Amino acid sequence: MAGFGEVIEWARQQVAARVPKADLDQRDPDFIRDQLSGLWMLALLYFRADVRGLDRIPKDGPVLLVGNHSGGNVPPDTFVFTLAFCLYFGVERPFYQLAHNLVATAPPLGFLRKFGTIAANPDNARLSLKSGAALLIYPGGDYEVYRPSWERHKVDFGGRKGYVRLAREAGVPIVPVASVGGQETALFLDRGQWLAKLLMVNRTLRLKSVPISLALPWGLNISDLLGHIPLPAKITIEVQGPIEVDADDQAVHEKVIASLQAGVDRLAAERRFPVIG
């Protein structure tokens, strides 16, 4: 009879095996074109979206866009930047965003796939870059996106630097994308990594955090799996200068973190109050 540990490992392997291979053709430029103006108006009115430095991104060809991540399961930084990228470069330029497989495959979120959202794994990342696309990733993942709100201006990938190898193998530059405001759309209290371990979803569902927050409409919000209504915090994003990738992963990683942190610090210095901006 299989032991409890073997059952958990089997469940983990089943989840990992079900991370879908990206179907890049699901991105639909016509759909994006139809939705873009209305969604951008929403971003301007609700989040007072301010995106700067898009001219620092190479005008064509594959590029790895690496951002700091905020906002829990309803991350406004991805929403705002995706719209701004499509407006600036046009909907025909291939552009994809990595997301947790639970997000990328959820039936109610099928429209995200039309915008270029694909399940996060190395194979899908390589596939999109090989196709010549721009790819947006958040190496900090759930570790960073659920950080406490009082650490909202801290860039923290949790030591993850596999993105550097990805860029080097694909032969593409890294362009850091700094953002502020997302961690003010709810009051994030704890990453809940201890809770993820207690519930064993870190091994079965690839969820390293079960965050604890105060958010609309739930009040006390455990896990954020159902999302939340984000507060109308001002979202400001600034693209930084490209970073060429060499053989020293650690050195490149440190350059990326330094570039992002400097950008976040500049943007944070402009803010008068949380949410208000």
Image (tube, grey):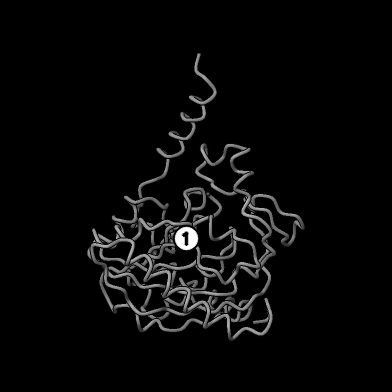
Residue 206 image position (x, y, % from top left): 50, 43
Look at 48% across and 67% down and name the residue there: 68
Residue visible at 42% across and 73% down in the picture: 258
In this view of the protein, which residue sits in the foreground, 177 or 19? 177
SS class, disc 1: loop
Q: Which quarter of the figure has residue 227?
A: bottom right
Name the foreground residue: 169 vs 98: 169
> In the rendered view, does 230 fall on the left or right side of 242?
right
Q: Residue, x 69% and y 50% (percent of image)? A: 222
167 sits to left or right of 190: left
Residue 46 located left or right of residue 77: right
Q: Residue furthest right?
A: 219
Percent of width and height locating residue 247: 23, 62
Which amino acid, by three-letter code, is at mark 1?
Phe
Residue found 68% across the figure and 77% down from its top: 274
Q: Is residue 21 above or below residue 216?
A: above
Residue 113's spot in the image, x, y percent? Answer: 44, 58
Q: Residue furthest top?
A: 1
Label 1 environment density (alpha carbons within 10 Å; few <14, some 14–19, many ≥20): many
Number of residue marks: 1
The part of the image, by quadrant, that contains residue 243 is bottom left
Q: Which of these two is toward me, 15 or 45?
A: 15
Q: From the top left corner, tell me how far across and down residue 105 is, in percent.
A: 48, 49
Vertical position of residue 157 compared to residue 238: above or below: above
Residue tagged 1: 157
Horizontal side of 269 relative to 158 (left or right) equals right
On-image quarter of the C terminus:
bottom right
Please state which of residues 69 and 159 is positioned toward the viewer in this rendering.
159
